[in-house]
Amino acid sequence: MEHGLLWLPLLAMFFWLAWQGSKEYQKVEAYRVWAEQFERAKYDIYSVLGQKGNSITWGKPTPQGPIKLETFSLIDVNEISLLIDGKSVNIDSIPDKGRSIELEFIFFQSADSVRVPFTEIPLAAEWGKYLHSALASLRSPNQ
């Protein structure tokens, strides 16, 4: 009887982990369906991000699909910054560690900004470089 009681918490932990895994799988599947409409998209536990043409859409992943979706145009963006722990860093020389990782989009017309959270610094830097080049090509007089 004592052995059964000792294994009960382990069994409960197993079911809890299986349930968490199932929820995460549902999030990824909902993201996959959502991301099909974009040219480029990313998923992590903090946010989803999609780019189609000049439009950027981001939100929070859930098992039912992304929520709190916001869309803005790159045409309205004045500057894109990579923030690590709240401080802007050079995208070409990124630090190895950081607790808070965000891409910040600062707009021409308002004092507001949009901060998209990331879990990994290299992924945020890759997106930052890509969006910097997309922004530069928008402003290029040759187009």
Image (tube, rainbow, N blue to C red):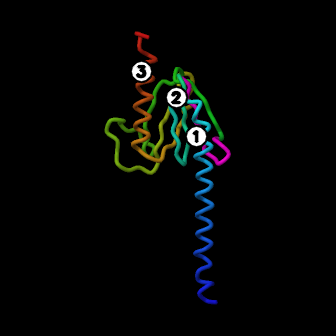
Compare residues 128 and 84 and report the one nearer the observer. 128
Residue numbers of the magenta segment: 54-66
Label 1 secondary element: helix
Q: Marks 3/2: CA distance?
A: 18 Å
Q: Earlier in the sequence, mark 2 or mark 1?
A: 1
The residue type indicated by label 1 comes to Arg
127 relative position to 17: left or right: left
Which residue appears at 47% of the width and 47% of the height? Answer: 119
Q: Quadrant of the C terminus?
A: top left
> Would you name the residue on which mark 3 appears?
136
The residue type indicated by label 3 comes to Ala
Q: Earlier in the sequence, mark 3 or mark 2?
A: 2
112 relative position to 81: left or right: right
Quick check: is 101 in the magenta stretch? Answer: no
Q: How many marks?
A: 3
Label 3 secondary element: helix
